[in-house]
Image (cartoon, rainbow, N blue to C red):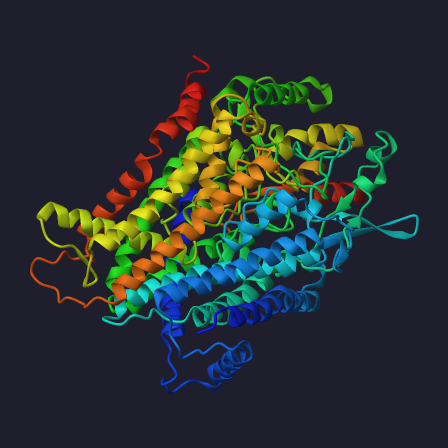
Amino acid sequence: MITSDLFQIIFYLLVLIGLAIPLGNYMAMVYGRSDTDHGQSSVSKFFIAFEKQLYKICGVKDNEEMSWVVYARAMLVFNAIGMLFTYAVQRLQPFFPGNPQNLPAVSADSAFNSAVSFTSNTNWQGYGGETTMSYLTQMLVFTAQNFLSAATGMAVLIALTRAFSRQQVDTIGNFFVDLTRSVIYILLPLSIVLALALVSQGTVQTMGQYCQYTPLDATLTSVTAEPITVYNIARGPAASQVAIKQLGTNGGGFFNVNSSHPLENPTPLTNFLEMLAILLIPAALCQTFGKMVGSARNGMALLAAMVIIFVGCLAVCYIPEHAGNPAFKAFGIELNADNKNCGGNMEGKEVRFGIVNSALWAVATTSASNGSVNSMHDSFTPLAGLVPMLLMQLGEVIFGGVGSGLYGMIVFAVITVFIAGLMVGRTPEYLGKKIEAFEMKMSSLVILFPPMMVLLGTALAVCCKEGAAGVCNPGAHGFSEILYAFSSAGNNNGSAFAGLSANTPFYNYCLGIAMFVGRYALAVPVLALAGSLVAKKKVPTGSGTMTTDNWLFVVLLIGVVLIFGGLTFVPALALGPIVEQLQMIFAGK
Amino acid sequence: MSIVRPALTLFALMTVSTGIVYPLFVTICAQTFFKEQAEGSLIYRTVDNKNVIVGSRLLGQTFVDNKYFWSRPSATSPAYNAAASSGSNLGPTNQDYLNTVQKRCVDWRKQPTNAIATEDKIPVDLVTASGSGLDPHISAAAARLQIKRVATTRGLTIEAITTLVTEHTQGRQFGFLGEPRVNVLELNLALDKI
């Protein structure tokens, strides 16, 4: 059945890239549009009038641009408001309407964690959706924050893009304009289309209560005498949230088990669409970047590096999952896949998705900062579970979060030209901008903060009993659960080795802090980098300039990402998944 | 230039439009065009002249009676609790987990009604818990393994049940997406109609 699996993977990548390029061109038009542009259709005139009206009400002066300091301040103030609001609504949940199940107020530590989580585009969920959050909370704060945190990431990326496309000025755009355009021209229309496509396949979208059913097997109700209340179906307005959680690389599910829940992700088609939505905007932004800096090839070079690492990681994840758990052979279990058998490691996986779609999703969701899941990563074979962990630890630059992934990758590109420059003894340039001491300082901050959060957080958690208490599986796997949690939080992913009982004050606060630092301690240096670059003159390319749109650069960039991003974590990974994989292989010998 | 006022008003407007208008708009469209799906693809059945919900086409449920096909193990509490989805999250080298899987295999083989030959292998999905705990499907092999039991209990021919299973085996969507599978609830409902 390898051929059918391979076909699904190739089809996915082709559709992804095929759609990313036109979408990227469209987004370049959205962000690049100025008031002096002419020749718009009546539809776009309507939207532009609406946008202008919005600015008027809000007091946004859309033709006034911001320096990087003002831009960063606007971004932080806007996100702080979001965080406070998200916290408040969860705490006051019982006093609001839209709570048909009468769910109580969320605890302080959990509400803090979720507030940071949803504003920082992480969407780590310490709680179970259907048992904790009311419909109003899910919509008003979580669905809304899914849009706004994604739009924040896109705005920061566009500001950095302008640093390369302009010269000798000190403004990088207007945060409020970039944010608004991201929402009304990109995220909202795509979400509406996706949400309705999902509903047509069976994703629920209702304001109705949880409904009771009478199970078909009558012996259940008569013999075991389970109380009838057990047979409840949790429902809600899920499709609208699922659409944006995928498109905005948020990942916070409506239900506890996220997109493995049949009412969130009912068919192989919804699975394909949701998977496509994870990487669509991050991939398209490469084209947007290339287009805006005036060289589509440079954008494609970044995209090529991403796709190559993606395919490599997918292979390492798929192969051990397809092979299954070697211990099962002794029990007489069929591990080979054919037209009748799923085969492989099916613990934590759904039959309708099988091995290939579970592995593909796991790699997509962690290369982007999405964090939604359609299978339980905690039950993956160790080597396959290492892949999502490593992808997060690389800083989520392989596609990455909407905006945040590409600005991370651009930082890696800056570091690559710097290293290449050192080798030949020339001042490095990227896209005509000289890379000097200040740029390198900011880039270093961007690549240093997440590993610091991941490794220090993991060290703290394994040293204290509150941390160790959360572990579900014994031995090396328990260590992996903690390492995964901090990798996920420190890089704003949000997926989990969900066996870890992380809804405790210790984890809620520690992971909350890691998510906060992982987002804002990166976005601000990126804006500072933009502020410094935008003031520089573009130097014309000379014979000694390193070309950044050829395969040599792609290979160098991959090397830098793997070495800088990955090497830091080899000792930690050796203690977790690597040792467990060896234990698993040699267990029977 | 002032930041706070635009930030506050823009936040309020954006929250209302993305947090209320957007989900309500999607709900209205969904309820208009895809009412059955939007409500959770519920299946109704007449019992004692009353129309009751027998479940959702998309959600698995527990079957213990020998006359029905059984679903996969479920990690929710109790099994197939559609109000609190959960996977087992057990790691592949966890000894407790391996013991559980081994016990499930023994249970399948132990029952004389299952009539599994010693050389027959057990499909992996039948002894592992799904991600959601609500998986409505089993593999075609997992359904075939249960044909003999169901046929014997119901006093029907193996051929009749085999035909029914074949009819209820869904291929890949559009011929290539996802995996082939059998919807357990729909199969059992069809069985009851024979």
Q: Position of residue B44 (x, y in %)?
A: 80, 52
Quadrant for the C terminus of chain B in the image:
top right
- Image check: B140 left or right of A207? left
Q: Is residue B182 visible?
A: yes
Q: Which residue occupies 71% across, 45% down?
A: A131
Residue at far left of view: A543
Q: Where is residue A486 in the image (x, y as percent from the top left)?
A: 47, 38
Q: Which residue occupies 51% across, 36% down?
A: A377
Height in image: A19 above or below A252? Answer: below
Quadrant for the N terminus of chain B in the image:
bottom left
Height in image: B130 above or below A554? Answer: above
Q: Position of residue A336 (x, y in %)?
A: 48, 30
> Total marks drawn?
0
Residue B20 vs residue B191, the one in the foreground: B20
Q: For residue B157, what is the image quadrant?
A: top right
Residue at far top of view: A589
Q: Where is residue A266 in the image (x, y as percent from the top left)?
A: 61, 50
